[in-house]
Image (cartoon, rainbow, N blue to C red):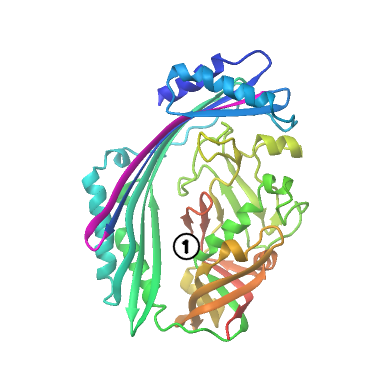
Amino acid sequence: MSDLLDLARAALDAAKGGELLEAYASWGRETEVKALAGEVESLSSAESRGLGVRIIDGDRLGYAYAADPDPDDVAWIVEQARTNAALSTPDEGNVLPDPQRAEPLAGLLLAELESTSVEEKVRMALDVERLVRAADPRVRGVDMAEYAEGIGRVAIASTAGVEAETERGDCWSVVSALASEKGETQTGFSFALARKPSDLDLDRVAREAAERATRLLGAEKPKTERMPVLLDPNAAASFLGVLASALTAEAVLKGRSLFAGRVGDTVASKVVQLIDDGRTLDGPGASPFDDEGVPTKRKAIIENGVLKGFLHNAYTAKRMGGSSTGNARRAGFKSTPGVAPTNLFLQPGTESPDELMGRAGRALYVQDLIGVHSGANPISGDFSVGVSGLIVEGGAFGRGVREAAVASTITDILSSIVALGNDLRFFPFGGAIGAPTVLVGEMTVAGT
């Protein structure tokens, strides 16, 4: 990783007096194995390496980057950033953060992940497909079965005094089962994420995908009624993904957040604790520092239902008169930092999903939200999306539900949350979103 830090330092050497310069160097490798019908459908591995340079001169920002640069290319990248800065419009929000010491975070990249052979990766992809087919005789096909992993390294240096480097790695398994009976086909999805391959429970992934598909066989369009709604962790995380985009200071500055001007207001029920924590290893967004070198930390965004604040990078903090929360996020070396969660999650409760089902009475259990991007609006707060799931009665699953929709507003849903389960799971929705099963007191379920 030292070569990345060397690249970043070389960029600093090319800075001129009066300029603020930040260099961001990164390397990454992603590997993916897909299985189909007992054979390897595809095996791919791709690497990327690059350097991005941000220059601020007289409140003017310029950015330039290059893929896989040599040390001799660094001066050219800096000069391109300088040229771009001269052509930009001044903005007092263009600043670099002051240096802060980030406490090391052990366990982000484990030796087992780096040493796992290609043959073992292929075996896991083939195994998860075989397991999902064997989980239930009604599983007649597998739409997707894969093992994948990502390893990355980052180094940041700036004339403000920031110097930081880190590495990380994750692996995951994804499977989508196709269950058929009496001419009907339903799909079930499952996903697992871990720091090392031996922690991936392929049996659980396969069983869950098969169960989510088979239990929807025979599903019907329900009658329209008001009833409690249980969002399983996958559905709840999809909802939080919409919510997350409204909780950044960047969205507030752009007029794209329904929470603008509401810090200190009650925006959810008292059981809601919404946390962003870049230091929890349970989430895939863990890192000792953000993409500007600011240390990450645990912070409450909503506490006991009250909105406590927004997520910031250095730019939004300057514009809004606050401090960076360690939430600067880049798409890679090709981009300047925006604002995004690290690991955003609902603090889980103490009740199991079965206990929540018993508490709900007659309710709709939602396992999939459909059309979230088009039916959920983080600006107006409108929320109307398609759903599939099951009717719950007497604490047990009843008939399946399809071609239904739930309609409400984001704030009404938050205010109507009655309880949260103890089954917190993280998903790669908009970064890293975690949610347990969520019991919403009442929503309109639209059907016939």
Report if residue 200 is visible in the image: no
Q: Residue at x 29, y 41 (%)?
A: 112
The span picked out in magenta is: 36-56
Q: Residue furthest right?
A: 261
Res 67 → quadrant: top left
Work out which quarter of the rendered image holds the N terminus and state it: top left
- Pointer 1 residue: 423
State left or right for residue 295 relative to residue 66: right
> What percent of the width, then of the height, locates residue 96?
65, 28
Q: Secondary structure at mark 1?
A: loop
Magenta stretch contains residue 367? no
Relative vertical location of residue 376 with respect to residue 154 in this rendering, above or below: below
Relative vertical location of residue 399 with respect to residue 26 in this rendering, above or below: below
Q: Residue at x 63, y 49 (%)?
A: 300
The residue type indicated by label 1 comes to Asp
Magenta stretch contains residue 42? yes
Q: Main secondary structure of the magenta part?
A: strand
> What percent of the width, then of the height, locates residue 312?
66, 41
Image label count: 1
Work out which quarter of the rendered image holds the C terminus and state it: bottom right
Q: Residue at x 68, y 44 (%)?
A: 250
> What percent of the width, then of the height, locates residue 48?
41, 35
Relative vertical location of residue 347 with respect to residue 365 in this rendering, above or below: above
Report if residue 129 is visible in the image: yes
> What percent of the width, then of the height, locates residue 180?
33, 78
Q: Residues within 10 Å of mark 1 (few under 14, many from 20)?
A: some
Relative vertical location of residue 427 with respect to residue 195 in this rendering, above or below: below
Q: Residue at x 26, y 48 (%)?
A: 121
